Image (cartoon, rainbow, N blue to C red):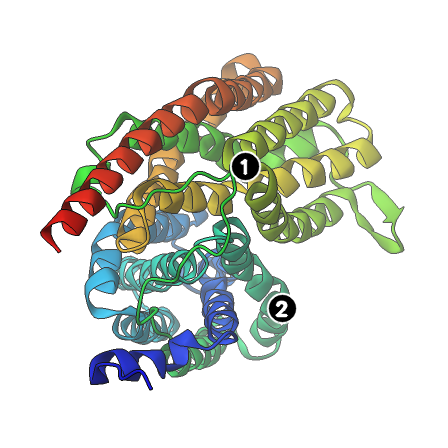
Amino acid sequence: MVFQPAEQHARQQTPSDTPSAKWWQLAFGVLCMAMIANLQYGWTLFVDPIDAQHQWGRTAIQFAFTIFVATETWLVPIETWFVDRYGPTLVVGFGGLMIALSWTLNAYAESLFLLYTAAVIGGIGAGSVYGTCVGNALKWFPDRRGLAAGATAAGFGAGAAITVIPIANMIAASGYQRAFLVFGLGQGAIVLLLSLFLRKPSVAVPIRRKNLRLPQTKIDRSPKEAVRTPVFWTMYAMFVMVASGGLMAAAQIAPIAHDFKVAGVTMNLFGLQMAALTLAISLDRIFDGFGRPFFGWVSDTIGRENTMFIAFVIAATACILLLGYGRNPIIFVLCTAMYFGVFGEIYSLFPATCGDTFGSKYAASNAGLLYTAKGTAAFLVPFASVLSAHYGWSAVFGLIIGLNILAAALAVFVLKPMRRRYLAAEAEIAEAAEARAVKLA
């Protein structure tokens, strides 16, 4: 009989070591993400009712959304710092309380100041949940990081798809204040409950298989160490390039549809009959949500950079087709769906690549730091309006096409060899450390 230390025996009996535990953790993370989706994707439903009630003007009301995106993005590194040290339960539970408080304040806001305060609180809450759930998925699935991060990020879109219609119906029947209150408290309570079931692995989850297309580090690097590497900043620059193009397209899809004279054209596609713009937005959400786990899974098989190249080239191709043939409503709908189907993959591929490169221990913090690239990209979105006003939509599409082609080239010709060199050097350091440990033993 072989006796084991009590601590080791206890560790082997923890729920995190059971085969099904990681899938439960992934499911809990996806559900949490679904519960915060409306803070971003459901906001548009409230803008006009708020304006009708208070006459603050759309621009002033929409500034609350800008504040939300800024706080949701830029504070993630701080929130994920707590995750890596204290675990996901505390941070996600805090996030649930904050999103409930945010929409409760929105329900009673009688001034823009209170509306903006609620946006800050909501951004902190959403960022706490988003950064934690993605980071936790990276830790539980070191050999399937692409799929895990993609499925988690997909929950962000799926939640909106499920609840947007009930929210719209409640606004119409009972007013926007009641919708804010009911859904805010409900979503916050569900997140708070789910936080009790979230946990990080009790020990580092081993990589079950060696994949030559998926090189991974054996050394955990902190955010302070990660930002000192050219690899991190190359990924950051690529993230900004692709995210800025996608955010530009998302923000301008309605004006583009109106200028192309297709917005109100009634269409019957796949059994769905509605205006081209409405159909395009609906399909964009579906394809975006599907693309995140799909391309994450593809990247687990053929490699991160190879998948990036394919996705970015498809995005550029979709924009070329839109520029040339987008005044045909069918082409407009299909090409926008095609574009957003590959755009969302950045929210699975970049966190997965970050985890592969810098390790699992600080995966949440490092991925959160990289996620701030979305905030950086958001500042470039207003540039699209200026560009279209002076040079037309061809200039905007040209910029998006150029950014995606550049990012695709960087993926295979710069990032791929750079990461291989970095990981080879890390492997040598790990082997030397192991050799010293053997000698000391």
How far apart, in angstroms, are the residues tagged by discs 2 and 1? 32 Å
The structure residue drawn at horizontal position 49% and vertical position 31%, both measured from the top left corner, is 242
Q: Counting other residues with Cα less than 10 Å from the Cα at mark 2, is it few (<14), some (14-19), or many (20 or more)?
A: few
What amino acid type is highlighted by mark number 1?
Gly
* Residue visible at 45% across and 26% down in the picture: 416
Q: Residue at x 61, y 37 (%)?
A: 253
- The one nearer the camera, 260 or 237, is 237
Quadrant of residue 228 within the rendered picture: top left
Q: Position of residue 402 (x, y in %)?
A: 53, 17
Could you tell me how many numbered marks the image carries? Answer: 2
Residue, disc 2: 162
Relative image position of residue 383 (x, y in whole percent): 42, 25
Extreme-front residue of the structure? 1
Residue 52 is at least partly visible in this image: yes
The image shows residue 157, relative to residue 312, as above or below, that is below
Please say whether residue 113 is visible from this viewpoint: no
Between residue 281 and residue 369, name the one nearer to us: 369
The residue that mark 1 highlights is 303
Residue found at x 62% / y 29%: 310
**Where does residue 282 sit, x and y in percent of width and height?**
69, 52
Q: Is residue 104 above or below residue 353?
A: below
- Please state if 204 lies on the left or on the right of 221 as rendered: right
Q: Is residue 302 above or below residue 124?
A: above
Please tell me whether mark 2 sits on a helix, a strand or a loop: helix
Q: Give amino acid for label 2.
A: Ile
Instruction: Return the x and y of residue 114 as percentages of the image width and height.
Output: 26, 64
